[in-house]
Amino acid sequence: MASRICFSHSSLFHDGQYVSTSISSACSSSSFSLRKFEFPNAASSHKRLTLQSKKTSLHPNAHVPHQDASSHDPDANSSSSSKNRVWVNPNSSRAKQLRTKSSSARYSYLSRLTESLDSCAPSAQHVSTILKGLGDNVSERDAVFILDKMVNSKTAPFVLRYFQDKIKPPKDKDAILYNVTFKAFRKSRDFEGAEKLFDEMLQRGVKPDNITFSTLINSARMCALPNKAVECFEKMPSFGCEPDAITCSAMVYAYAQTNNVDKALSLYERAKAEKWFLDATTFSALIKMHGVLGNYDECSRIFQEMKDLGMKPTVVTYNTMLGGLFKAKRPWQAKNIYKEMISNGVSPDFITYSSLLRIYAGAQFGADALSVYKEMKGNGMALSLDLYNRLLAMCADVGCIDEAVEIFEDMKSSGTCRPNSLSFSSLITVYSCSGKVSEAEGMLNEMIQSGFQPTLFVLTSLVQCYGKAKRTDDVVKIFNQLVDLGIVPDVRFCCCLLNVMTKTPKEELRKLTDCIEKANTKLGSVVRYMVEEKKSDGDFRKETSELINSVDVKVKKPLCNCLIDLCLSLNVPNRARDILDLGLTLEIYTNIQFRSQTQWSLHLKELSVGAAMTALHVWINDLSRALKSGEDLPPLLGVNTGQGKHKYSEKGLASVCESHLRELNAPFHEASDKAGWLLVTKEAAKSWLESRGSTESIADFNSQVSGGPTVALQYRYVVY
């Protein structure tokens, strides 16, 4: 059936074999001039080309036809007398020329009619006025041509009804007219109108066919209404329609968009097996579907299959992949996707850059995020408030002070957005973590002048700022302001106070202990055990356990880290050991130690410096006990500290750990091929452990720890 409505304008009119013409004079047959053409139905049995002549008056007062659409109709009055005909050899070049000219003239005329219909008011009267030039004997072919070219979905139904009244087609022919009318709704993205026309079609008793549903499904797809596409597709069997490969291919997209995984994957596998054509949009929808479900490896698989099948990814496909990688937190893979995109000549758009900024900022890839920011500015793209704030928050996390100030000033002068509370908070954090008190206070004043009240996050940053500057009284002042504002201190604020205590002179600790006790009585009680060096070990463990169990899971590890850091600062390592043991027991610290036949390793990169040093000493004691009990060590032992350091810190965990092992004369060395690893061979480790003699002889820190209860790091055995 598709062949009945899918034709070009040239093939549409080449069937006509009769050409009627008017002559400017009846005096001579040599003075014929082409004026009007006759196009009989395709079923006509005439096989000869004839020229029809007609006398016309040259009198200046002769009747002039009304100048409307009909005055330009090459077919007007085509049913006039055909008595005078001249046969022309159909094999001559002149006959071919006449056919070509007739097709072009007819096409131009019908195209002008279509343009008039698309621009007229949607009413039966306006449509009738424009189409009356076609006369009463309107051909189905002309009707199909006009409806097929229309783009105005408001006027198209009136045009359809006009042709139905003139042609009175049988039901099967009526379906063709409806199908080409549906295309106007698809072009104008008016699915609601298409649904109304479909209901009218059924009410008239016209049975929809495959083309009807295929057009409706594609219309729903173009209108971003995948649920409607599914609804149309699932109606097909009730009308006796069997979907073809093209329709099924479109439904892969629709089912993927509606997250109907089973249907989408079933059709996708069938498409691959039967070699259906799937466009880039369909692959993008499948990738997005897996991304929503968190199946990020499947996203990569579909993306690779797309390329293997010869389909080139578009900017939408790359953006969809980047969106999934943002949720998956895979910055390295995102970098590779972007490189591939550029190498394939696909130009990134705003969505591409936005996704990259979110990925890099979230992963604290400072250099990459700032590079994307500069590229966006170089391309004249305006950043949104969200993107500015993500960049500022990243700068606060990694310590890019100058860059943060530059971005903040650019934001204020952009004209597209103004700093909000989050923007000011990030700048205050940047200054606070750097110990720039006057700058932090200045930004706080600017924040208040801009109409924003300081938040708990801002006050927490200021506490950290004053703590770095050893201004304990100002820390207490901020705490009192917080209480006066009716803000309840949370665990993160208390952790900040604990961190400040590690830098506070002992004679001023009581000021901060009082603040902590007011903020959280359970935490205050635990801190007093450390500061006042109370001896009740059982009560300390019990109260610390109750404290840890009372806080949200997201802050359990930061709280334990801060408590252990404070223990080492106060020189009470036994308490640090107790808290580490509780953290292991309550599974707050997991996957710290791994063992395989070839290597035992300790992973410290997610711990604070104090927690990492405590875990390191416990691990060394575990090794000593293993050796003493006759257990064989693996060929290699390693400590994973991660690489780099926080920009606000003078030292990173790796340098602190390496320095401490050097103090212990431990033969660990930095791995040349594994960044962030300190390694030692079995023989060197065994010799060093034996030379220590016992766990009590390993430096002052460890001798104090060894006096406490025995702690062993839990480990996971890995088979490589």
Image: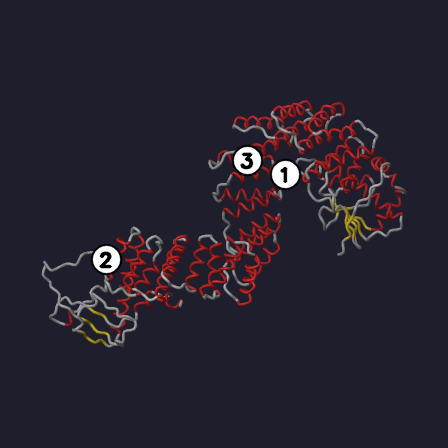
Image spot of residue 678 (x, y percent):
76, 46
Q: Which residue is mark 3?
A: 406
Image quadrant holding the N terminus, namely bottom left
- Sequence order check, earlier mark of 2 and 1: 2
- Secondary structure beneath dot 1 equals helix
Mark 3 belongs to which amino acid?
Glu
What is the CA distance from the residue labelled 3 to the residue labelled 1?
Answer: 15 Å
Image spot of residue 141 (x, y percent):
31, 66
- Front-most of residues 17 and 34: 17
Q: Which residue is mark 2?
A: 69
Q: Residue at x 74, y 43 (%)?
A: 587
Label 2 close to label 3 by CB (< 8 Å): no
Local crowd at mark 3 within 10 Å, few (<14), some, or many (≥20)? few
- Residue 398, label in figure: 1
Mark 2 belongs to which amino acid?
Ala
Q: Write down the quadrant of residue 713 in the picture.
A: top right
Of badges 3 and 1, the one in the foreground is 1
